[in-house]
Image (cartoon, rainbow, N blue to C red):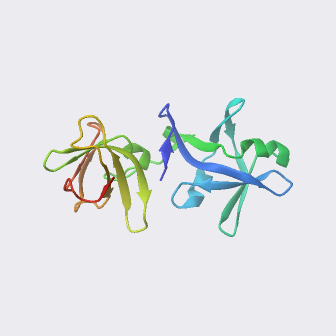
Amino acid sequence: MARDIDSSRSRIVMGRIGRTHGVKGWLKLQSWTSPAENILEFAHLQVETAIGLESLHIDHSRWQGSNLLVHFEGYDEPELARRLTGCDVAVDASELAELEAGEYYWHQLQGLQVVNTAGENFGRVGHLLETGANDVLVVEPEAGSIDDRRRLIPMVWDQVVHRVDLEAGTIEVDWGADFLVET
């Protein structure tokens, strides 16, 4: 799953580069894909650096404990690699695998309007949370929503989430206005 999408909506943020590791330019990579190693399937990752958008190629990777370590082609010294620390890594949206009907990437759900079966507008999906049991929609109020409260709505298909309509930009939920409200 991708966590976020950049403002151009053509690049999907898949993780963040951490600090350097060792003396040969290796870096820690925090992957937001599920499972984490799926980030290694992308041939080219894009980063926004001080000098602009740059395409990176992972030429080596390994796990060290729970840390994913990567080496980017051409970044053989820690001083050079250090300039990538803290950068988000993204891929072109066109590189994402096609999903089965009824499956969605997180970035596709962000920004959709959430309406319950009674027709009440709760607002828009600001982001999602992964809880282990199920993902959770974090719904932010907007002009036109029934109130100004943030809602946490579990992504439980059929029981809670009835329909996602990407073209209409809506998610229909069976959720009462007073359930799991965050103030």
Outermost residue on the left side: it is: 118
Q: In percent of the image, x 71 and y 32: which residue is there?
A: 50
Give the total of numbered labels. 0
Q: In percent of the image, x 38 and y 50: which residue is there?
A: 104
Q: In percent of the image, x 49 and y 49: which residue is there?
A: 3
Q: Which of 126 and 38 is in front in this view?
A: 126
Residue 1, image x and y in percent? 47, 53
Residue 176, image x and y in percent? 19, 56
Answer with left or right where residue 152 lies relative to residue 45.
left
Up-down relation of residue 30 to residue 67 (above or below): above
Up-down relation of residue 132 to residue 33 (above or below): below
Q: Nearer the viewer, residue 173 or 53?
A: 173
> Residue 178 appears in which quarter of the rendering?
bottom left
Q: Nearer the viewer, residue 40 or 50?
A: 50
Residue 23, image x and y in percent? 86, 55
Outermost residue on the front side: it is: 183
Residue 74 seen: no
Residue 131 seen: yes
> Residue 133 appears in which quarter of the rendering?
bottom left
Answer with left or right where residue 165 lies relative to residue 15.
left
Residue 106, image x and y in percent? 42, 49
